[in-house]
Image (tube, rainbow, N blue to C red):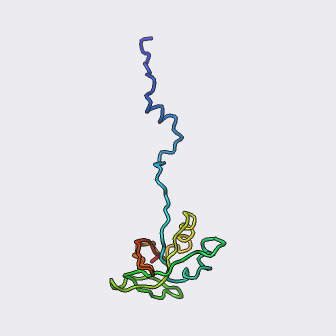
Amino acid sequence: MGNAINIAKPSAMQRKFLNDSGDFLDLNIPSYRRRYYFFYGTFMDPSTLAKVLGISYRPTTRPATATGYKCKLWGQYSALVDGPPGETVSGVAYEIQSQDEKTKLEMYEGDSYALEGCLIKFEDSSQVLELTFK
């Protein structure tokens, strides 16, 4: 056969690729990490927060402030707006426990609020750069 093609044995890299399960995006990087969310309105009530999160226990919140914002009423609801650099809004911080909780909060807030980074200060003077809905 003059037109025969010589197919060499696949290399180790080619064999690994060919035997791969197809999950090419698995880089062993977690898609979720626990983060504090600052709440300033209805979510300051632990029973409301628990209901939205779909949990049967009382969520542990920490009294906190967010710097650089002020609150305004948007209809019957509070909304954060940019404020002078030193102005603070009082509220609570809750450490989101799972991707499921994060998703439920985002679905509840819908397109009305955007998730934004904010400086959260706790009563013990510690502070973290985390998230809030604005």
Residue 74 drawn above or below residue 53: below
Name of the residue lying farthest toward the front: 124
Identity of the residue drawn at 50% across and 60% down? 32
Quarter of image, res 65:
bottom left
Identity of the residue drawn at 45% across and 23% down? 9
Identity of the residue drawn at 49% across and 86% down? 74
Instruction: Give 6 or 52, whichever is nearer the viewer.
Output: 52
Q: Position of residue 22 (x, y in %)?
A: 52, 42
Name of the residue lying farthest toward the left: 85
- For the C terminus, the quadrant is bottom left
Q: Position of residue 12 (x, y in %)?
A: 44, 30
Q: Position of residue 116 (x, y in %)?
A: 42, 72
Quarter of image, res 114:
bottom left
Count the numbered circles shown: 0
Name of the residue lying farthest toward the top: 1
Instruction: Give 34 or 74, whichever is nearer the viewer.
Output: 34
- For the N terminus, the quadrant is top left
Quarter of image, res 89:
bottom left
Instruction: Give 117 or 77, whichever is nearer the viewer.
Output: 117
Residue 72 drawn above or below residue 114: below
Q: Position of residue 4 (x, y in %)?
A: 44, 16
Identity of the residue drawn at 59% across and 74% down? 59
